[in-house]
């Protein structure tokens, strides 16, 4: 939330889409103070763009139903290491952003200076092919967790520019006064110019 407040101080009046919120920390603040905040989750097998029985709209970050130039901000917190087609995801985020809008997100940059590497992918029949030992992260709507599909490195900025045309800055936050001192504390901001 620090980067949203610092770089987008008028965010409370923005149209904000958050994919897969966790409803603690930043997600709670966005929901409570944002005038035009829309949280969504992906429920496989359920119609996209429809309200799910959970009360949340069903959206696939790789294939969204929103019109072009719809949001001022898109927020994803630890989502993009779980998508099977990050090219589509970044293109869709860029498509839904208005000019001057931004995607503010976190994703573990575990490969740092090494190239990003695919950890799992779908084969031609749609089955999951594991390229390394499967890893799962917590998922607020699925107790089985979310499969890690890619280990990102700092080259993610080049990937995003190539795939979506968005220019990305990595903000390193190591500030004990904010309670932030750990691994994977980078926040990425991709802007639609």
Image (cartoon, rainbow, N blue to C red):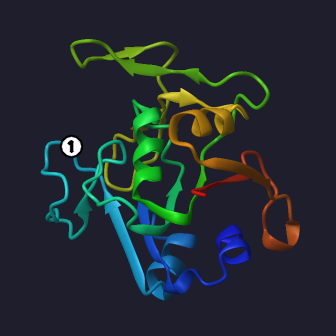
Quadrant (top left/top right/bottom left/bottom right) for the C terminus: bottom right
Going by the image, does 176 lie left or right of 1? right
Q: Give the x, y percent position of residue 8.
A: 65, 75
Q: Where is 129 relative to 165, above or below?
A: above
Q: Residue at x 49, y 79 (%)?
A: 14
Residue 20 shows in this picture: no
7, 59: nearer the viewer: 7
Q: Residue at x 29, y 44 (%)?
A: 63
Q: Residue at x 61, y 39 (%)?
A: 161
Residue 154 shows in this picture: yes
Packing grade of label 1 (10 A; few <14, some 14-19, many >=20) is few
Q: Where is 106 relative to 119, above or below?
A: below
Kindly state the secondary structure of the residue where label 1 is placed: loop
100, 154: nearer the viewer: 100
Q: Residue at x 64, y 71 (%)?
A: 4
182, 69: nearer the viewer: 69
Quadrant (top left/top right/bottom left/bottom right) for the N terminus: bottom right
């Amino acid at each position: 939330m620090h980067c949203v407040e610092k770089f987008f101080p008028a965010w409370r009046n923005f149209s904000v889409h958050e994919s897969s919120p966790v409803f603690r920390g930043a997600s709670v603040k966005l929901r409570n103070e944002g005038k035009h905040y829309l949280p969504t989750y992906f429920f496989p097998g359920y119609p996209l763009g429809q309200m799910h029985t959970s009360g949340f709209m069903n959206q696939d970050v790789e294939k969204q139903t929103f019109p072009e130039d719809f949001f001022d901000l898109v927020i994803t917190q630890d989502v993009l290491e779980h998508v099977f087609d990050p090219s589509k995801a970044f293109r869709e985020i860029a498509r839904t952003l208005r000019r001057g809008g931004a995607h503010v997100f976190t994703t573990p940059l575990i490969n740092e200076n090494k190239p990003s590497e695919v950890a799992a992918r779908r084969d031609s029949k749609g089955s999951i092919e594991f390229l390394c030992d499967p890893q799962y992260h917590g998922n607020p709507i699925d107790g089985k967790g979310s499969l890690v599909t890619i280990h990102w490195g700092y080259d993610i900025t080049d990937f995003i520019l190539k795939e979506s045309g968005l220019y990305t800055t990595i903000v390193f936050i190591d500030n004990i006064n904010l309670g932030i001192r750990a691994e994977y504390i980078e926040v990425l901001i991709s802007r639609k110019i």
